[in-house]
Amino acid sequence: MTVYDPASVKISPESWVAEQAKRYEESDGTEATDLKGSPCLLLDYEGRRSGEWRRTVLIYGRDGDDYLIVASKGGAPEHPLWFNSLVANPEVHLRVLGERFAARAEVLSPQDKARVWPHLLEVYAPYDDYQKGTDRDIPVVRLSRI
């Protein structure tokens, strides 16, 4: 496990994600905190193969005090790389608006996913089309503060 240092985290190579992450971080969580009206957080996770800390921007929902993220990858047939890393290394770091904290990731059971899915569709309706457009069951991940 590599020591976590938020200043040395590698930001996603995807240009729009990198730009949004940079604005979110540089503004201390006061800018670039949503995507088309849906709330976003910064997820810092340890790469399962490289051991390097990486950052991405993800839409989130809530379940009590926990945060929920969806491994949709736009309905692609494979999981996003960050999801595979979370399964291997579930201890992560989040920035939600102006707050930064450690969290533990847990993939929801089918029953828990069914319970929170309607809320996630309220947060970001395209998730429904993403799920309908792929044979892959799109995972939902709970992020619990530690």
Image (cartoon, rainbow, N blue to C red):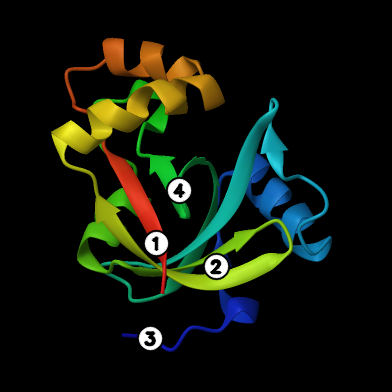
Give the numbered dot on residue 64: 4
Q: Are marks 2 and 3 in contact (CB under 8 Å)?
A: no
Q: Residues within 10 Å of mark 4 (few under 14, many from 20)?
A: few
Question: Which of label 2 and label 3 is nearer to you?
Answer: 3
Residue 83 in percent (x, y) is at 31, 50
Determine whether 78 is above or below 57 in the image: above
Residue 98 in percent (x, y) is at 74, 63
Q: Residues within 10 Å of mark 1 (few under 14, many from 20)?
A: some
Residue 100 appears anywhere in the view: yes
Q: Are marks 3 and 1 in contact (CB under 8 Å)?
A: no
Q: Amino acid at mark 3?
A: Thr
Circle 1 sits on which residue? Answer: 144
Give the numbered dot on residue 2: 3
Q: Residue at x 55, y 72 (%)?
A: 101
Question: Which of label 3 and label 1 is nearer to you?
Answer: 1
Residue 124 in percent (x, y) is at 53, 23
Q: Residue at x 28, y 10 (%)?
A: 132
Q: Residues within 10 Å of mark 3 (few under 14, many from 20)?
A: few
Question: Which of label 4 and label 3 is nearer to you?
Answer: 4
Q: Amino acid at mark 2?
A: Lys
Question: Which of label 1 and label 2 is nearer to you?
Answer: 1
**Label 2 to label 4: alpha-carbon separation:** 30 Å
Circle 2 sits on which residue? Answer: 10
Judged from this view, the residue extending furthest toward the bottom is: 3
Q: Are marks 2 and 4 in contact (CB under 8 Å)?
A: no
Determine whether 136 is above or below 39 in the image: above
